[in-house]
Amino acid sequence: MQQDKFIQQRTSLNEKGIRSVIELLKEGATVPFIARYRKERTGGLDEVQIASIRDEAKKHEDLISRQKTIISAIGEQEKLTDDLRTQIESCFDPVQLEDIYLPYKQKRQTRGEKARKLGLEPLAKMIMSQRGGDPERMAERFVKGDVVDEEMAIEGAKDIIAEWINENATSRARLRQLFERRSTVKSKLVKGKEEAGEKYKDYFDHSESLNNCASHRFLALYRAEREGIISLKVRPDEESALEFLERFFVKGNEECSDLVYDACKDAYKRLLRPSLENEIMNVAKEKADKEAINVFSKNLRQLLLSPPLGSKRILAIDPGFRQAAKSYA
């Protein structure tokens, strides 16, 4: 996507003005200079709009750079296809881009990776297919080397399946929507912190919908959690999340399907929930910061626009750099 179109989608500003601002920024012009002296080129854009264009242009550059890095990393693994390259190059959502890359990202020594090294990935595929059969019979031929019995083979296969579930971009996106729409903010007092956290006493045992949580309240909860006064959880009802994963991944009603469901629960609790909860916390914090800044800006604007001498009539104020300001009534 071209940079100017990317910025237009995010700011709803005029494309011609966007192009002019980008050109002026590349020439070394500052935001205040452009806003004051280049109105004829930008169509009268103000400082806030120009700054948003600058910021979105930087985001676009970062995304293009990240796309190139991901393409290079997957190419080195010899797993890059034309369809995958197109998918990466057409993705301009940073979260979705990382979801696409997740299955190809070099991993530390995870439980699933250990199971793969034991040769259990074929067993995981057989179980994941859910085509019937006895899992223990399937696992018999994988009992060799460091795999001491069928139970160990099945557990290793479930670890691999849990990572597949975690890395599925479609299910992650839909589960992310569940976190965004139905998360609850819950706080609990950390034992022994009653006195130190006296100013946060309203949040020692607090619960409310994330979407209904005012920005100032969320920021207070966030600070209290960072100071070690409370523990903070932002997540949807676990039953709803597991129900979604079951609908998405469990295809039958037999022993292999039961194992896949077990892997869904493990994937959610160990991999998906911590990752998505961290994401939603960061998004909520960023949103709360912006709302707090907007409130501060409005209050400051009202203060600066208030009459300087109360109800006294003022014809003009002459700003003086040497002898202070003078007012003329």
Image: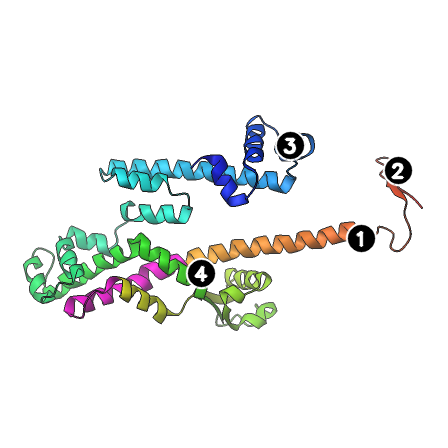
Pointer 1 with pointer 2, Cβ within 8 A: no
Observer-nearest of 28 and 203: 28
Pointer 1 with pointer 3, Cβ within 8 A: no
Observer-nearest of 316 and 219: 316
Report how far apart the C-alphas of labels 4 and 2 lie in the structure.
56 Å
Whether residue 300 is visible, yes or no, is yes
The x, y position of residue 161, in whole percent, is: 22, 58
Mark closest to the chain's N terminus, 2 or 3: 3
The x, y position of residue 254, in whole percent, is: 15, 70
Pointer 1 with pointer 4, Cβ within 8 A: no
* Circle 2 residue: 323
* Circle 3 residue: 34
Pointer 4 with pointer 3, Cβ within 8 A: no
* Circle 1 residue: 306
Query: Does residue 288 show up magenta in the picture?
Result: no
Find numbered disc 2 in the image and state the secondary structure of the residue it sits on. loop
Classed neighbour count for the residue bearing mark 1: other residues with Cα under 10 Å, few (<14), some (14–19), many (≥20): few
Mark closest to the chain's N terminus, 4 or 2: 4
The x, y position of residue 77, in whole percent, is: 23, 39
Classed neighbour count for the residue bearing mark 2: other residues with Cα under 10 Å, few (<14), some (14–19), many (≥20): few
Report how far apart the C-alphas of labels 1 and 4 lie in the structure.
40 Å
Amino acid, disc 3: Ile
Q: Is residue 246 above or below residue 40?
A: below
Report how far apart the C-alphas of labels 2 and 3 lie in the structure.
32 Å
Find numbered disc 3 in the image and state the secondary structure of the residue it sits on. helix
Residue 180's label in the rendered image is: 4
Residue 133 vs residue 163: left or right?
left
Find numbered disc 1 in the image and state the secondary structure of the residue it sits on. loop
Residue 142 vs residue 206: left or right?
left
Tell me which secondary structure the magenta stretch mostly adopts.
helix
Classed neighbour count for the residue bearing mark 3: other residues with Cα under 10 Å, few (<14), some (14–19), many (≥20): many
